[in-house]
Amino acid sequence: MKLTLLFIGLFLGLSSAIMIPHPGPLHFHNPPRYQVDIDAPPKVQWAPIMNDFKEPLSIFIAEFEHLLPIPKWIFNAVGVYGKTIFKYQKYVKQVEAIAELTGLPFNTLFTLNFMYELASWKACTGVVVRNNNGTIYHGRNLDFEFFRYFSNLTMTIDYYRNNQHIFSVDGLAGAIFFHSGVKPGKFGLTQTTRNSKSLFTNLQAIAKGNFPSVWLIKETLETEDSFEGAVQKLNTTAIACPIYYMVSGPGINDGVVIERNYDSIHGFYQLNETTSFLVQTNYDRDVPDPWYDRRRIPAQERLEKLNGNINETILMEDIMMKYPTLNVATIMSTVVNPRTGYFNTSTWW
Ligand SMILES: *[C@@H]1O[C@H](CO)[C@@H](O)[C@H](O)[C@H]1NC(C)=O
Ligand SMILES: *[C@@H]1O[C@H](CO)[C@@H](O)[C@H](O)[C@H]1NC(C)=O
Ligand SMILES: *[C@@H]1O[C@H](CO)[C@@H](O)[C@H](O)[C@H]1NC(C)=O
Ligand SMILES: *[C@@H]1O[C@H](CO)[C@@H](O)[C@H](O)[C@H]1NC(C)=O
Ligand SMILES: *[C@@H]1O[C@H](CO)[C@@H](O)[C@H](O)[C@H]1NC(C)=O
Ligand SMILES: *[C@@H]1O[C@H](CO)[C@@H](O)[C@H](O)[C@H]1NC(C)=O
């Protein structure tokens, strides 16, 4: 009960925070970028990254444990579950590698990798837009509590197989999931939060073996090889928490929003001749956005004004970097061109 209240409090805090502009001048940097062999042992994959991020990650974990005094037995129970019953052992091995490399407790790191399922105080905006040449661009802002800590944990990874670049992702060091990714020439993929009603139903879904919703992004990039394949996988995989997926691709109508329930689709929206962009924040598209969070509308109005004159730079600077799409809680912005594989992650301070 206390925990629920705490989460609700943080969520309400963020709901109002996301309407606050970024204070002072906007300082930007492209976070470190790593080349990783996807078939290497997990410890080899994560060693250079954890070498750079061990310190900020330790600071965040210490602060998190202080801010949210979750009893140790919960972390321990989740950790034991992870190592014994949990279905996706490939991902457990990744967390084990991070724990060994940083000396941080596996149980805490593993539990935190269910951040999306455990808490609903996240925001974010996604955009897919077609320009006058028929090229699709895809953008995403990550808005989250703890933004002061997470800004120091952002990174980009280019995954390789047999020395060939297969896909790129960005995320936060310590997490084995990613928020955005691109498979060059095939598809781009991002998510935004769909606020779920119940922590309990999420836990039930995890226990049933449903795929953790945000982890599915890397899994899809790894296993699917086309826009349609990616959409189909994200349409149909049973997941652990409701979510919005956005997928972009090389074709002129290759831009979708998938509103997902645990085992089904709530809504599906695609670009067509008359709709050249879709902006998705954190609400279902068949009901009006709540009065306290109107982030979708200014972004739509700006896209309308640009009238198809869009490229990588313009999407970043005229849409993703503009208030309220970018606000006090925005940690990073990502711009993707699925046709070329262009992938720009910018972190804001
Ligand atoms: C779009 O077309 C114009 C002229 O036809 C060209 O100058 C521009 O570089 C093209 N942009 C892209 C993103 O292909
Ligand atoms: C983030 O990194 C900057 C620069 O290294 C540092 O000054 C700041 O204290 C760090 N913030 C946190 C919350 O660790
Ligand atoms: C995904 O689901 C939507 C909604 O049911 C459907 O219209 C679309 O054809 C599906 N796409 C694929 C590739 O399965
Ligand atoms: C295009 O997509 C929009 C939004 O999904 C929808 O309202 C509209 O009916 C579609 N138009 C056509 C011609 O399919
Ligand atoms: C995008 O277009 C703007 C304005 O035409 C131009 O200044 C900028 O260099 C272009 N960016 C890219 C990546 O082509
Ligand atoms: C990413 O976008 C920012 C803002 O437009 C720009 O300053 C930066 O040079 C870009 N970085 C890369 C790697 O393209």
Image: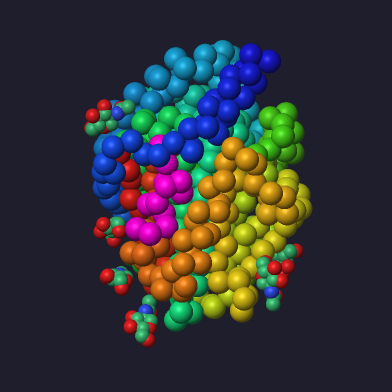
Residue 3 coordinates in the image, percent (x, y) = 62, 18
- Quarter holding the N terminus? top right
Residue 255, magenta (yes or no): no
Colouring chosen for the image of the structure: rainbow
Residue 164 coordinates in the image, percent (x, y) = 36, 67
Question: Residue at image x 38%, y 70%?
Answer: 311
Q: Is residue 45 above or below residue 163?
A: above
Q: Please tell me whether the stretch drawn in magenta is mainly helix, strand or loop.
A: loop
Residue 265 coordinates in the image, percent (x, y) = 74, 55
Question: Residue at image x 40%, y 51%?
Answer: 322
| Nearer to the camera, 282 or 337 | 282
Res 201 → quadrant:
top right
Q: For ligand 6, give the image quadrant.
A: bottom left
Any part of residue 56 in sight: yes
| Nearer to the camera, 285 or 35 | 285
Res 48 → quadrant:
top left
Question: Residue at image x 33%, y 64%?
Answer: 313
| Nearer to the camera, 6 or 104 | 6
Image check: 342 left or right of 29? right
Question: Residue at image x 65%, y 57%?
Answer: 258
Which stretch is magenta?
A: 317-328
- Quarter holding the C terminus? top left
Any part of residue 50 in sight: no
